[in-house]
Image (cartoon, grey):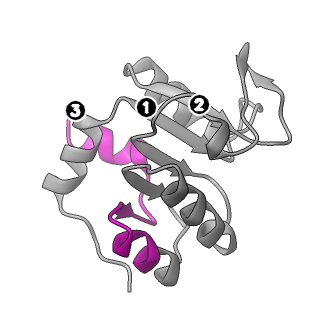
Amino acid sequence: MIVTPTDDSIRKVLTEAKVIAVVGHSNRVDRPSYQIAQFLRQRGYRLYPVNPAVQEIDGQPSYPDLQSVPEPIDIVNVFRRSEYLAEVVAESIAVQAKTIWAQLGIADPIAAETARKAGLTVIMNVCIKVEYLRLHL
């Protein structure tokens, strides 16, 4: 079961977070992961691309996995298909991330429950940029 987060819980996640790891960050400017990552960077978040197929994005290193990110992660923002969420959740738990945020169209109720039981805030099937703008942050 995927629980719909409240506006207050989304606001709290977005205002307290400083570091976001973008899993599935593309180096192609026409891809939503690239555009949304740029938007978040412009809002002051420190972003870390996580994509083993890409060496760097706009001069910033791309990391092969969450364990390689050099500082604690507040939000793991996922741009990978739903069938990969369980793996991303396991990595997120291993690095003690605070929140797993799966973009619009991405959800897995079993992975969500695993993350929740491990103490992570879980937001799935929701666009981080849309919520940021909707909540006027």
Q: Nearer the viewer, residue 29 or 50?
A: 50
In the picture, the disc for residue 19 is: 1
Q: Are marks 1 and 2 in contact (CB under 8 Å)?
A: yes
Give how far apart the Cα atoms at labels 3 and 2 are. 21 Å
Q: Position of residue 73 (x, y in %)?
A: 45, 39
- In the rendered structure, the answer to whether residue 11 lies left or right of residue 53 reads left
| Residue 77 is at least partly visible in this image | yes
Q: Residue at x 41, y 41 (%)?
A: 129
If the image is split into quadrants, where does the N terminus sit?
Answer: bottom left
**Location of residue 90 with respect to 1 vertically, above or below:** above
Which residue sits at x=31%, y=40%? Answer: 132
Report whether 39 appears left or right of 56.
left
Q: Quadrant of the C terminus?
A: top left
What's the CA distance linking mark 1 and mark 2? 8 Å
| Quadrant housing residue 48 | top right
Residue that carries the numbered disc 3 in the rendered image = 137
Task: Look at discs 1 and 3 and give the one toward the viewer.
Answer: 1
Magenta region, residue range: 112-137
* Magenta stretch holds residue 109: no
Disc 2 target residue:
48
